[in-house]
Amino acid sequence: MNSQDYYIYSQIITTVMGFADEIMREFLDAHPDAAGGRWSQEELNQKLSAFMQNRNRKPVAGFDGLSAEQMHLLLNAPFGHGSIIRRHPTPADTTIDQVPFFVLIEILYGMLSNGPIKLTPKGNLPVSVCRELYERKLLIQDDIQKGYTKKISEDNVAFIQALKACILISPDVKKRGNALSLTQSGQKSLSKERNILFWQVFDTYTTQFNWAYLDQADAQIGQFGWAYSIYLLHRYGAQEKEAGFYASKVIQAFPHLQEPVPSTRFEGFNLEPALIYRWRFVEHFAGWFGLIEIRKGTNDVFDRQAIIQKAAIFSELFQVGAQKGSVK
């Protein structure tokens, strides 16, 4: 455990212990007889269990109106039974066509269906493949568009790095002899219904791919609680908001994410959590998956105040609200 992880761990433990004391005080205020030793252990356990169930179903101010129970599901089973977020199991092709990251995955699978892709001696995708992916203009990068970065290569294009990482995480692609090729599972994926493959890619990106891979910042913010950020987009995304608005909401819910993060590229320089949130959730997830429209406030790559708004396909992919039969 490094120093950053240890600090976060200690902060969480301190918060949890204080939270437990708060719960016990609330319980004793509601049941003063519990302090007098008049109840059996079984009665005490039953009362405490009922108290906790009721408490966990009440809205929490720091969770933007969600209950502790709802937040638990967003963190651990975002699309599970009882979760406030549900995904459309069969989004239309016209909807999927508007998810640039997935369309690029399809293009890469199409290349692999024609035979293995030989990698460079460094293990990167060849420049010809990178150029073909980039020149589709489904996703672009500011430094390349403005001419600051001349060469289109895996090392220079973040979304190409993510594309390659995700296909290698999946069971569909293997790397052997410094070449990428489809596995038997990958061959079968070519004939899968498109919506099934889409949600597989979505799950790979959100639950298996480490978003810190793209920026090397030793922090959880952005990926931690990504489903809560989707809930926030549902709630506030109809109007344009600065990216910092969503970052502050997430930090309010999870205070352990608020500490400045040492830069791995510039010694002695700290990165603000809100900036990392913009990189990871706003640009490299919600933007790449077509969930938002982005209008940057300035041309500065370190400007965290990009202006964002929920895209039309958001409601075609997700439904947000209490499920029928679930406890509100």
Image (cartoon, grey):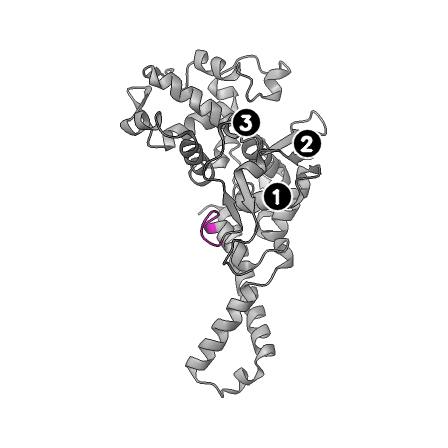
Q: Which residue is rendered at x = 55% and y = 85% of the image? A: 33
Residue 144 is left or right of residue 87, and the answer is right
| Label 2 to label 1: alpha-carbon separation | 24 Å
In the rendered view, tell whether residue 123 sits above or below residue 207.
above
Identified by mark 1, the residue type is His
* Residue in the foreground of this view, choosing between 66 and 221: 66
Question: Is residue 136 covered in magenta?
Answer: no
Task: Look at the numbered discs 2 and 3 and tell me whether their residues touch, using CB distance below 8 Å.
Answer: no
Residue 166 location, quadrant = top left
> As displayed, is residue 220 above or below residue 104?
below
Q: Quadrant of residue 284?
A: top right
Q: Label 1 belongs to which residue?
A: 234
Residue 316 appears left or right of 186: right
Compared to 5, does 10 lie above or below?
Answer: below
Comparing labels 2 and 1, the label whose residue is closer to the camera: 1
User: Considering only vertical position in the picture, is 18 above or below 222?
Assistant: below
Q: Which residue position is annotated with label 3?
A: 98
Give the residue at x 70% y 37%. 242
Query: Neighbour class for label 3 at 10 Å: few (<14), some, many (≥20)?
Result: some
User: Considering depth in this image, is 289 or 319 the residue closer to the camera?
Assistant: 319
Q: Percent x, y for residue 281?
A: 57, 37
The percent position of residue 133, horizontal first and vertical second, equals 48, 17
Magenta segment boundaries in residue numbering = 76-82
Residue that mark 2 sits on: 303
Give the residue type that dot 2 points to.
Asp
